Image (cartoon, rainbow, N blue to C red):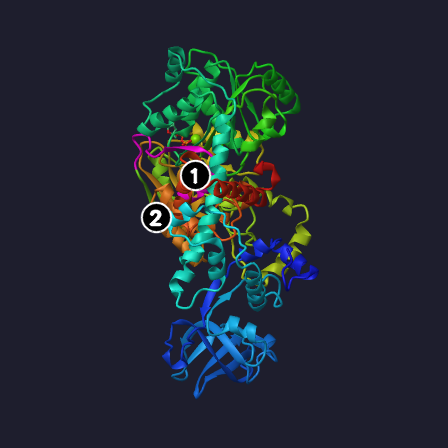
Amino acid sequence: MYVRGVGPRVATLLEAKGIRTAEDLLYHLPFRYEDRQHPKALYELKAGETASVIGEIRSAGLVRTNRKPIFEIVLAQGAFTIKCMWFNGGYLQGRLRAGQAIALFGRMEASRSSRNLKMIQPQFELLPEAGGDEQTRLLEVGRITPVYESLGGAQLASRWQRKVIFQLLESIRGNVPECLPGAIRKRNGLPERETALAEAHFPLEGTAADDLEQARTPAQRRLIFEELFFLELGLELKRRRSREQKGIAFATTEGVREAIREILPFHPTTSQKRSLGEIVADMREPHPMRRLLQGDVGSGKTIVALQAMVVAMENGYQTALMAPTEILATQHYLAARKLLGRSSRKYRMALLTGSVDAETKRALRRQMQRGEVQLVIGTHALIEENVEFDRLGLVVVDEQHRFGVMQRFRLMKKPNDAEPDVLVMTATPIPRTLALTLYGDLDTSVLDDLPPGRTPITTRRVASERAEEVWEFVHGQVAAGRQAYIVYPVIEGSRDDQQELDFAQESAGEAEVTEKPKRKSARSQTLFANEKTTARPRMELRSATEMHEQLRTRALAGLRVGLLHGRMSADEKEVVMRRFQRGEVDVLVATTVVEVGVDVPNATVMVIDHAERFGLAQLHQLRGRVGRGSAKSFCILMTGERVSAEAEQRLEAMVATQNGFELAELDLKMRGPGEFFGTRQAGLPGFRVVNLVRDRELLEMAKQEAVRFVTAPDPEVTEAERRRVWDHLKQSWQRRYGLMEAG
Ligand code: ADP
Ligand code: MG
């Protein structure tokens, strides 16, 4: 439709910001509001307060200090004045002039030299003068004024948006189609769509500032609910649709049960029993299973998955397990071989990773095609290489948030076959808000107790100056027959030009790969490095390779010290890993590859150097590598010189709790959902008005309503309302995920 103020040139700019339709523009909500109804009098303001004030510029200009230019204005309300200043404010010269009306938003600071208050670096907006464009003026003063993120430079900043959105709202008044049934709105106290849009942009007089900031006004809640409702509705439908597909109804005869029991070397925990029960119940259904198995590190997911795989094999089907890294695939393979080795049946297993040579791969593929291999474990080489199965019955994905491959299983089976069951395992506790949005189409099983005999891990923070004490402690543990990990953020070199490691880069495999080209063009790299580092003091980063050498010859001399990192070949890695597992190496110096790799119950010490550089989830995963046996375990977080406030918070949390779900919630709060999952690649929907951290309660409401809408139709909801819900659902899923999945 035609929107006043948007010509072809502006349209292009808007499109770059993801705004393609009038509707998109309407859902571009203010990120903040300024109360300009009753502007605060300057004399009311107190130091430390963040306020928005309106006044007239009495004087303006650059103030020379001995260093950088400061732009300063004197803001006046009648006889009362305050100063406002901007550092490096040269760009304001000529823009702010005496006589202009201006609105400012910022923090009041006490001035050192006088009793007066001043504002430092406030945000500002020049106000239209009386007698000018009256409509614009009305949108900006004497009301609660919306402030928008710019949609393209100064031109498409707040003022432009206010005007265009206001006119748009006017032009469609009375014609905004409602997409939520009245019964649902009433039940949840939500206004109509048109009202909600109007008031979210231009709040009614007297709306509480707090409610607005926290997106808690009825108008905002309605729009947030709407977005969540249609997301959850779509997920619920997906869930139901896969239930309706033809799947495999596995039988659980006494023989099958016996086979499951045979591979168990210990008594399963309560939650292992419960989870396996849920999984097997799904597998017996003639519809495909889509289930998520969540459990903290060390909670014992592997054995549960293997038992499910035994059910599939005992029913004459093939089964596959996919892991995110080669090390983890190998680890699973070794574990599987050990456990399945206990069985009287001889299962035929194979390992397929990227580093298997081409000929072996070909042979393997043939065997899978003919159904000669019953169980295959591998990396995503499994799907990439277009492997075909004879009778694929169950796929287990050890996800670690890295794949999002659900849809791609189609590649792996013959057309017209029944859909295989899918079990997704994740070792990272997922906050419920994210689980609901990202995995809302899966059923969930949770392992929430740890296998018996685990003792809590003691976690300490130590500044790196005290490293000697740490090495002494490691000596002591090794003397007592234990083993230790020492983890560094980088493989080699001491550059500090890479981002803080975080969860997104996860199996450091990736973080490390990005380093690879470095050596080849050392010269030009150094040139660039110099340019870069002028801005920031260079910090020495201790690295795995260098510290391995140093520790081996000095602080840890006499101990058997091994090295493991992502640039070693799969064979080399495996050799080191096995030696560590067999106790032939006392101390393993490593990068984050050990995060997912090694399971060594005898290891009791995890030293993480430069702990300030790791994300919470990663720290938690690393810590989970110890405390796997019955001996007391320790996690030592060593920090370098610079620890940011955020890092400080992460480290404190690590010391305070060992509960993965708590840490995950905190991680989500600190970094937001995009970062938590390493952005969209994981399939996290892009929201327009929702903020998952903030809107948790609305998410639960929306989820409930969505399920109810599908399962227990409200008698009050009319046929026309239903149709509008379905139409809107289609549109919103198409926008969000593209056409493919909307169908
Ligand atoms: P996860 O994959 O969830 O991180 P694992 O499956 O690797 O955990 O199990 C961690 C360790 O605990 C393994 O050494 C495993 O053999 C052991 N384990 C698992 N379940 C039990 C149990 N019920 N009793 C005792 N040990 C267990
Ligand atoms: Mg495991």
Note whether 244 is above or below 632 in the view shown: above
Q: Quadrant of residue 520?
A: top right
Q: Secondary structure at mark 1?
A: helix
Ligand 1 picture quarter: top left
Q: Is residue 548 left or right of residue 342?
A: right
Question: Residue at the spot x=49%, y=19% of the render?
Answer: 248
Tag shown at residue 108: none
Q: Is residue 17 left or right of residue 694?
A: right
Magenta stretch: give its range.
431-455
Question: Residue at the spot x=47%, y=63% of the render?
Answer: 32
Q: Amino acid at mark 1?
A: Phe
Disc 2: which residue: 655
Magenta stretch: includes residue 439: yes
Q: Secondary structure at mark 2?
A: helix
Q: Nearer the viewer, residue 312 or 604?
A: 312
Earlier sequence position, callout 2 versus callout 1: 2
Question: Residue at the spot x=31%, y=39% of the render?
Answer: 456
Q: Are marks 2 and 1 in contact (CB under 8 Å)?
A: no
**Quarter placement of the C terminus:** top right
* Mark-to-mark CA distance, 2 and 1: 44 Å
Note whether 269 is above or below 178 in the view shown: above
- Image x and y of residue 5, in percent: 64, 64
Q: Amino acid at mark 2?
A: Val
User: In this view, which residue lies farthest toward the bottom?
Assistant: 79
Magenta stretch: includes residue 197: no
Question: Residue at the spot x=51%, y=47% of the render?
Answer: 543
Q: Is residue 13 left or right of residue 108?
A: right
Q: Nearer the viewer, residue 422 or 347?
A: 422
Tag shown at residue 709: 1
- Image x and y of residue 62, in percent: 56, 82
- Image x and y of residue 713, in percent: 42, 37
**For discs 2 and 1, the disc positioned in front in the rendered view:** 1
